[in-house]
Amino acid sequence: MARSEKKARRLLVGGETFLWALSHTHHALGNGQYEGCCETLVIRRFKARGRLRIVFRQGPGRLVPDGYLMPSGAVATTEGGLLNLHEPGTARAMLDEALAQGWLPDNALVQEMDGWTLFEAVATRRGAAPAD
């Protein structure tokens, strides 16, 4: 089951416009229970065919909204870092990190990146990383 992507929001970076949207997916087990919750941040350059899907899957030590403990758009680790993917500043930091790791926004393909590989750098940039 997937909550449809909301209307894309604009993100201005230098002289360029990017669009970004957030979606949530999960598998319904019945009786109000779900498994496999996943938050996906989709970023693309305005008028470009390709896009980047930054995916945060639920797993050990990794928290995503599940309808009970985590609010919509939040991703966190059990070590204490938390990011709100609804915030434009977080989307911008994700874009900057993805570009630093080699994402090419003019590539016509859809590329998927594990969001957890970007999490620590983005959390530090956003001031959300736990203190050592």
Image (cartoon, rainbow, N blue to C red):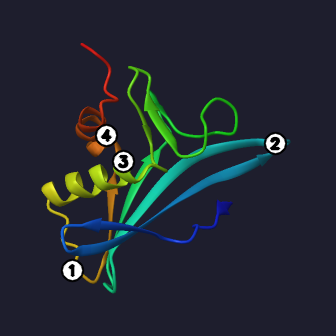
Front position among marks 3 and 1: 3
Which residue is more in the foreground, 71 or 101?
71
The numbered mark, 2 or 3, whose residue comes first in the sequence reads: 2
Residue drawn at 86 percent across, 42 percent down: 31
The numbered mark, 2 or 1, whose residue comes first in the sequence reads: 2
Q: Which residue is mark 4?
A: 119
Assess disc 1: are there few (<14), some (14-19) or many (≥20) residues with their C-alpha within 10 Å of its C-alpha.
Answer: some
Q: Which residue is mark 3?
A: 90
Q: Residue furthest right?
A: 31
Assess disc 2: are there few (<14), some (14-19) or many (≥20) residues with their C-alpha within 10 Å of its C-alpha.
Answer: few
The numbered mark, 4 or 2, whose residue comes first in the sequence reads: 2
Assess disc 3: are there few (<14), some (14-19) or many (≥20) residues with their C-alpha within 10 Å of its C-alpha.
Answer: some
Q: Amino acid at mark 3?
A: Thr
Location of residue 3 (image quadrant):
bottom right
| Total residue callouts | 4
Q: For this view, does 118 lie left or right of residue 5?
A: left
Q: Secondary structure at mark 1?
A: loop
Residue drawn at 47 percent across, 56 percent down: 40
Q: Amino acid at mark 2?
A: Gly
Residue drawn at 49 percent across, 71 percent down: 8
Alpha-carbon span between mark 3 and mark 1:
22 Å
Of the numbered discs in the image, which one, if any, rests on residue 9? Answer: none
Q: Which residue is mark 2?
A: 32
Front position among marks 4 and 2: 4
The numbered mark, 3 or 1, whose residue comes first in the sequence reads: 3
Q: Amino acid at mark 4?
A: Phe
Q: For this view, does 53 lie left or right of residue 27?
A: left
Q: Which residue is mark 1?
A: 106
